[in-house]
């Protein structure tokens, strides 16, 4: 049973500047909920109960969002705003065990994950990136934990990483893998390359921000070199593979929405508006007048 999920949310969000100068990218609203809440819902719906946020200066509001605001609650209660009160309580109740640790100086995703080592301890855990949303019938992380459990019967010390086929022109935005197909949705990964130029990409299978790791990943995160000021998680994954630990790529079922750039964020907004019965017609009518 994997219970702990690490959410690295310390990044500066430069791809969404200028708004991210004052608002953490994780709190940008998709309709009336912050992006991070969609990710937290997926984690909770997948059976995890302990969420570890790796934050940085100015990101405290992410934790506050999931915390109990007694002042707001009594204000709403006094004014008999029951519907709003239950809306607030639903968010407050989501995370059973919430903890955080600070990455004081940005040093890459690998370093952010390593910051969570003490809080994770010696057990398998998930790493979930807040930019990547997956809309699916079965939550993406749940699909992954089920795959992890099935694999546990035949192997040990293994990791599972979610993969998605992307357009070739997008390969240099992501970690890209090379591997051997084992089943339709399962690949044994041999090589991972972080944001390769198109001509060097070994495939168009990209790593999305969902990983299940054994705690041994921390040993590799401590060994990898710092390149251009950053420790890359991808380098630790490659080092783990080279040392004989099996790393599986799992091609999940669902729609991935990359909210880390303006185009993807806009698409995600439209995607969730179309799923909302009260907004679908508004969007359709508005667009039909525009076009
Ligand atoms: C990170 C990882 C990359 C992965 C991507 C998924 O990149 O380093 O391997 O494909 O997340 O969103 P970032 O988006 O932090 O630059």
Image: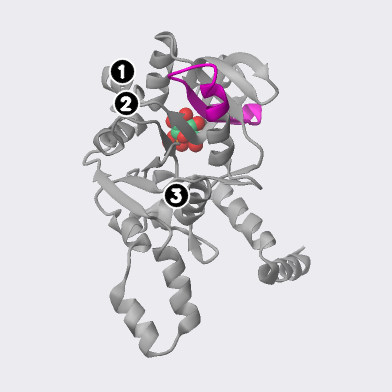
Q: Residue at x 66, y 48 (%)?
A: 137
Would you identify the image quadrant in which residue 168 lies?
Answer: top right
Residue ID for mark 2: 231
- Secondary element at tag 2: loop
Q: Residue at x 52, y 45 (%)?
A: 46
Q: Is residue 278 visible?
A: yes
The reply, left or right, for residue 36 in relation to residue 142 is left
Q: Which residues are magenta?
A: 148-171
- The tag on residue 16 is 3
Residue ID for mark 1: 224
Neighbours of disc 1 within 10 Å: few (<14), some (14-19), many (20+): some
Neighbours of disc 3 within 10 Å: few (<14), some (14-19), many (20+): some
Residue 4, image x, y percentages: 38, 41
Residue 194, image x, y percentages: 46, 23
Q: Are marks 2 and 1 in contact (CB under 8 Å)?
A: yes
The reply, left or right, for residue 249 in relation to residue 70 is right
Residue 286, image x, y percentages: 72, 69
Q: Is residue 50 magenta?
A: no
Q: Quadrant of the C terminus?
A: bottom right
Distance from the alpha carbon under mark 2 to that under mark 3: 22 Å
Q: Are marks 2 and 3 in contact (CB under 8 Å)?
A: no
The reply, left or right, for residue 132 in relation to residue 100 is right
Extreme residue in the bottom direction: 79
Work out whether mark 2 precedes mark 1 in sequence or the reverse, and give the earlier one: 1
């Amino acid at each position: 049973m994997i219970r702990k999920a690490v959410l690295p949310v310390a990044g500066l969000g430069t791809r969404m500047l200028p708004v991210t100068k004052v608002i953490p990218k994780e709190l940008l609203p998709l309709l009336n909920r912050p992006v991070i809440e969609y990710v937290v819902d997926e984690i909770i719906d997948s059976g995890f109960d302990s969420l570890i946020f790796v934050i940085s200066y100015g990101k405290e509001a992410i934790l506050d969002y999931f915390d109990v605001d007694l002042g707001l609650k009594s204000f709403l209660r006094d004014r008999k705003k029951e519907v709003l009160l239950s809306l607030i309580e639903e968010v407050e109740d989501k995370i059973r065990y919430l903890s955080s640790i600070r990455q004081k100086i940005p040093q890459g995703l690998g370093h952010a994950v390593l910051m969570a080592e003490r809080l994770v301890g010696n057990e398998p855990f998930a790493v979930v990136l807040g930019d990547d949303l997956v809309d699916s019938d079965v939550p993406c992380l749940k699909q992954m934990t089920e795959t992890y459990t099935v694999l546990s019967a035949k192997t040990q010390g293994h990791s599972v990483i979610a993969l998605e086929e992307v357009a070739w022109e997008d390969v240099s935005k992501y970690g890209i893998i090379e591997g051997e197909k084992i089943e339709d949705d399962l690949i044994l990964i041999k090589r991972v390359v972080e944001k390769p130029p198109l001509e060097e990409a070994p495939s168009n299978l990209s790593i999305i921000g969902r990983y299940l790791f054994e705690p041994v990943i921390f040993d590799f995160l401590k060994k990898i070199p710092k390149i251009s000021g950053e420790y890359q998680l991808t380098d630790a994954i490659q080092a783990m593979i080279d040392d004989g630990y099996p790393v599986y790529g799992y091609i999940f079922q669902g729609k991935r929405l990359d909210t880390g750039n303006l185009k993807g964020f806009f698409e995600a907004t439209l995607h969730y508006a179309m799923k909302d019965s009260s907004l679908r017609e508004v969007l359709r009518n508005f667009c039909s007048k525009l076009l």
